Image (cartoon, rainbow, N blue to C red):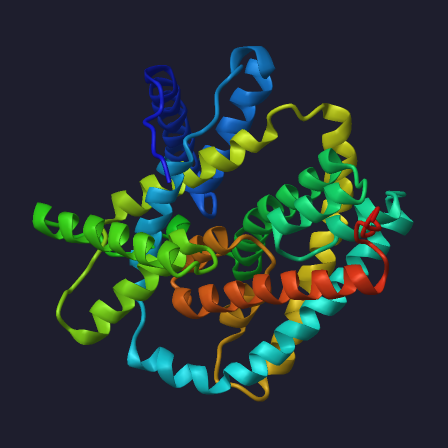
């Protein structure tokens, strides 16, 4: 696999966007916004994209390598949260996995009705927009059967953005006070980290990312470093602690990359998609909350841990939310990986069952 460095113009523009996103994150932190560094940078970048338009950003793509590098750092941070207590919590995993499968099936069916009946989307677009995960698989499969890829992509991105925005905000309103980093919770601690430890963290991130890609793990940029960091932490050989500033920078990079996804979006498309996404996300969060309440009766897991495990954001984004709220980030991440795997498997089966696949062309011979 070939590797090429971004052009100087791409590097400078990426640095400028991250600095602007960091300023937005700092302002959001001062205003006690939940998940301030990610949400603040996301909003600022979306505004920059809206004002710059296609002309101002022509030919620019946010460097995927930069995003993956910082996601790997997040994976290392999550791995440091793996403790013997987490291993004991895995005893209840069959129950939560069964509930997760119920969530995927009901969420997909309910979302389809929202997008098709309420939103008036054609059947193929509604079907692939409705999945509670598997963003790239949904877009690629939907494109082959004539779904409106622009609408489908917007609905899938808005699902992630709305979940990571609404969940921390709703928790702050429910508790009557800021939560997570907005309340001064510092993931990783605020003690200084020596340069040697930073080098070990970077090495663990790079090695975990390489190993995960070698064996084709899902969400490899997050899961590989997480597993390696967890093994190192449990072995007692290495004591890894990421400084808060590194976690904040990682959130800014993720927020900027999410904000860049608003490129080429018209106001009309955004207004239409936003209303449908709000209805869809509200439905899925209510479903996740109901399943979480039910699981409280048969597991020792807390309601917040369960709710974050069902909230249908992206793996990286929900892992960051769990880190910010100091709520079992490793366990939450595990459930989101399983949700995406279940969704992709369910999508392939249901697409064949209901005829949402490209027909196989007959062999002319």
Residue 75 is left or right of residue 91, and the answer is: left
Q: Give me the residue at 34% from left, 50% from top.
A: 72
Q: Give me the residue at 61% from left, 74% from top.
A: 292
Q: Quadrant of residue 148?
A: top right
Give the percent coordinates (x, y) of residue 13: 39, 19
Give the percent coordinates (x, y) of residue 277: 72, 46
Q: Is residue 221 visible?
A: yes
Say which quadrant the N terminus sits in. top left
Q: Is residue 24 above or below residue 38?
A: above
Q: Quadrant of residue 226?
A: bottom left
Q: Is residue 80 visible?
A: no
Q: Give me the residue at 14% from left, 65% from top.
A: 238
Outermost front residue: 365
Given residues 362 and 246, the one toward you in this image is: 362
Give the percent coordinates (x, y) of residue 127: 79, 52
Q: Is residue 215 above or below residue 74?
A: below
Residue 285 is left or right of residue 106, and the answer is: left
Residue 122 is left or right of residue 191, and the answer is: right
Give the percent coordinates (x, y) of residue 68: 38, 43
Labels in figure, total: 0
Outermost top residue: 55
Q: Give me the residue at 83% from left, 65% from top.
A: 353
Q: Is residue 169 above or below residue 347?
A: above
């Amino acid at each position: 696999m070939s590797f090429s460095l971004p052009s100087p113009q791409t590097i400078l523009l990426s640095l400028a966007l991250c600095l602007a996103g960091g300023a937005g994150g700092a302002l959001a932190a001062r205003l006690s916004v939940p998940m301030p560094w990610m949400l603040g940078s996301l909003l600022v970048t979306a505004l920059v994209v809206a004002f710059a338009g296609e002309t101002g950003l022509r030919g620019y793509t946010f460097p995927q390598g930069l995003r993956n590098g910082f996601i790997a750092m997040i994976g290392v941070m999550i791995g440091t949260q793996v403790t013997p207590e987490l291993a004991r919590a895995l005893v209840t995993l069959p129950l939560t996995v069964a509930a997760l499968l119920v969530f995927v099936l009901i969420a997909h069916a309910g979302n389809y009705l929202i997008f098709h009946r309420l939103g008036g989307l054609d059947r193929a677009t509604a079907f692939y927009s409705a999945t509670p995960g598997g963003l790239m698989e949904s877009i690629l499969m939907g494109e082959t059967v004539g779904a409106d890829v622009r609408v489908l992509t917007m609905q899938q991105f808005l699902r992630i953005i709305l979940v990571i925005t609404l969940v921390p905000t709703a928790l702050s309103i429910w508790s009557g006070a800021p939560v997570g980093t907005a309340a001064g919770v510092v993931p990783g601690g605020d003690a200084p980290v020596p340069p040697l430890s930073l080098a070990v963290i970077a090495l663990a991130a790079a090695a975990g990312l390489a190993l995960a890609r070698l064996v084709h793990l899902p969400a490899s940029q997050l899961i590989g470093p997480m597993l390696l960091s967890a093994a190192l932490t449990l072995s007692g050989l290495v004591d890894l602690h990421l400084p808060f500033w590194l976690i904040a920078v990682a959130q800014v990079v993720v927020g900027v990359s999410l904000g860049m996804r608003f490129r080429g979006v018209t106001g009309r498309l955004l207004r239409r998609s936003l209303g449908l996404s709000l209805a869809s996300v509200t439905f899925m969060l209510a479903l996740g909350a109901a399943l979480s309440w039910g699981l409280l009766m048969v597991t020792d897991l807390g309601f917040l841990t369960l709710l974050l495990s069902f909230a249908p954001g992206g793996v990286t984004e929900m892992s960051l939310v769990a880190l910010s709220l100091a709520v079992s980030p490793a366990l939450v991440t595990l459930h989101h990986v399983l949700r995406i795997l279940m969704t992709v498997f369910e999508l392939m089966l249901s697409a064949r069952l209901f005829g949402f696949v490209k027909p196989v062309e007959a062999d002319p011979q």
